[in-house]
Amino acid sequence: MEASGSGGTTTGTSPAETAPEAEARWTATIGRKIRVVVAKPGLDGHDRGAKIIARALRDAGMEVIYTGLHQTPEQIAETAIQEDADAIGISILSGAHMTLVPKIVELLQAQGVDDVLLTVGGTIPTRDIDQLKSMGVDEVFTPGTGTDEIVEFIRNGVEGRSRSI
Amino acid sequence: MEPASTSAGSEAAGSAESGTADRVDEESARNDAAAAEPPTAEKNFTTMSGKPIKARYGPDDLKGNPAEEIGEPGQYPFTRGPYESMYRGRNWTMRQFAGFGTVEETNERFHYLLEHGQTGLSTAFDMPTLMGYDSDHARSLGEVGREGVAVDTLDDMEILFGGIPLDRVSTSMTINAPAAMLLAFYVLVGERQGVPPEKLAGTIQTDILKEYIAQKEWCFPVEPAMRLVTDMVEYCTDNMPRWHPISISGYHIREAGATASQELAFTLKNGFTYVERAIDRGIDVDAFAPRLSFFFNAHIDFFEEIAKYRAARRIWARELKETYGAKKPESMRLRFHTHTAGVSLTAQQPLNNIVRTAIEALAGVLGGTQSLHTNSFDEALALPTEEAVRVALRTQQIIKEETGVTNTIDPLGGSYFVESLTDELEADAYDYFRRIDELGGMVEAVRQNFPQREIGDAAFTFQRELDEKERLIVGVNSHRHEEEEVPLLHIDPALEDKQIERLRKTREERSQADVDRALAELKKVAGAGGNLMYPIIGAARHRTTEGEMVSALQDVFGTYTETPVF
């Protein structure tokens, strides 16, 4: 994850599958599209990134539920559970990530949700990234990350989990 | 940009051939391959906003009667600048946006900046303050003092401006939905310092339309929010002749992903909407229009930005005169603050941001800005350290004191390219005005998510171009290398407790009966009509908190929930 800034191109892994191909394969595996909740906790209104990611995931064949702005951790956990999300993408640029993200993790765990892929995106200082990951966040994407990288991480992560079940 | 990358490319290719391939990373090798190919007809020579650019411009590219369209500095239509003497007469105000932690830390930063030659103040409030929540509200947890300074009551405001003579230093405050409450605090701090409202100089942002469009910090539904804006315009027209009650802001619209044309169009259209509301209120356009000011982004596409500022001045002048019947030149004269583009800063190789900021700041200066904020190089990572802020301020001082660009007024005026680009941006803006009018005006367009959708589309297009390397950002999708760490500012989480404790003390010391009476009066005026500034000042005087006032108004007005589009 130290490489989050220098990630970007993903040559080297499997040749790019087109979105319809990936969608078809996934749908055949579990019977529906990958479902992602894109969530904006905190009071900041910086939704440029969240909306771009939501759109990129949708274009990649996923079903995207965008919570809208200013959500409490309770609202986000509730949405993820109700929507039976495969992944949650939290976007936060308010500086409150060390308060709000652990709260979301805690609420999900309390409800017995342990199979959701959890990613965080935003202006997250390096020293907070390790801590977030040790709490159960699967990946932290910092500014400059390409959308392809995020799409691929979510697809691989969700598929990996479904295989291990 | 192209010639530069070509020459850098051939150099790198040369060293690769001489056996030092390990020093050439994969990225630049790829760039070299691209540079070696001759430019094809489809190669994009476009501005950052996607506007096609020709290889050369000449006299045929100037529209109409150039002398009339361009005019003279300080004269209608003000294309060349709002003042006759521009920076020869008075330099732009160096105004660094600052605010973090509690009022004590920010007050200290204010003094630091003034000691280093800054000439005006600009206050960044934290997210709870921007949303109208007190620091002890459940929603404020973890957010107090994180992205700006926490201000709950008049007591906080007094410490924030402690030791700063408000009759001599002009202050800008970035606050919108609860702007009226913060203006009330400021007026009362002035009063405690013995400075009457008519002597206070500065700006409060108050631009609520761009909040619904882009910045997304709101307290009330659109209509009552517009009423509050008009109340402030009316109050300031009557009481604060040196104050700018609205800073009509394109900055956040651009940061949310808008193109230069969209920034220009939506900002000006918001401005016209405020003008219409004030005229409808019965205020003479020439009484308030001279006190409206603007706030634009300075992004990295140098000439497009300069053209944007010039187009903005010309459009504003024409519309104020011809559509809104202004008679005074001061009403037609658009003055603006510039803030270099936060979104152009990269978390990768942060020192490169100093260069970006310098170029953007220069665009603001060549575009004729009245005040300028330069970003600090570490701001893609955190709030800036003192050292980073000093470099940012020095950047402005270097432009002013060393480069000589202020020697002559509007040095780019008459450039075939710049004038042509100015005309094009102007035409784009009028196209948007028409589309917005067809939807029923800006308030209705906002309700229908029109500007929000346009901006979202532009942001997505830009990201796709980055992903596909049609556009390059050094350190992000080009010229990458291992990262160096820079020291970052860390906000002590204990500051939140300190602020909550101060708030608790204020609540304990004040007369709750006075507060209750003041809040009842505020609600009464909210329901019955009348200018809300007066009961807000009344309540603030009794140390009513910002959150209590906002909450009282929400009881009458309701709240706002966005229907997001992506």
Image: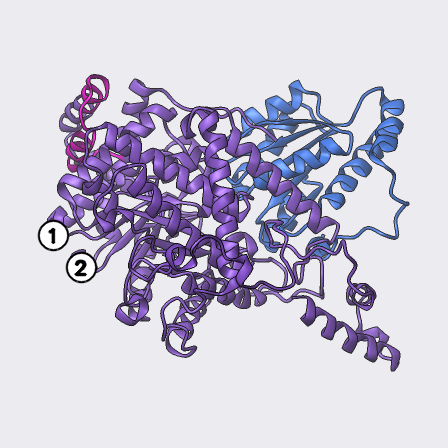
Chain colours: A blue, B purple
Amino acid type at image mark 2: Pro
At 82% from the left and 34% from the top, the residue drawn is A19
Task: Write down the quadrant of residue B220 in the picture.
Answer: top left
Residue B5, labelled with which disc? none
Residue numbers of the magenta segment:
B522-545
Element type where label 1 sits in the image: loop
Residue A102 horizontal/vertical position (percent): 58, 37
| Image quadrant in which the N terminus of chain B is located | bottom right
Which residue is label 1 attached to? B195
- Between B149 and A25, the residue placed more toward the observer is A25
Mark 2 and mark 1: Cα distance apart in space: 9 Å
Q: How many marks?
A: 2
Subunit of label 2: B
Left or right of B97 in this view: B358: right
At 26% from the left and 52% from the top, the residue drawn is B160
Q: Work out whether mark 2 precedes mark 1 in sequence or the reverse, and give the earlier one.
A: 2
Element type where label 2 sits in the image: loop
Residue B165, labelled with which disc? 2
Residue B356 horizontal/vertical position (percent): 54, 64
Left or right of B201 in this view: B323: right
Residue B57 horizontal/vertical position (percent): 58, 63
Label 2–label 1 contact, CB within 8 A = yes
Q: Residues within 10 Å of mark 1 (few under 14, many from 20)?
A: some
Amino acid type at image mark 1: Val
Residue B312 horizontal/vertical position (percent): 41, 49
| Image quadrant in which the C terminus of chain B is located | top right
- Between B502 and A126, the residue placed more toward the observer is A126
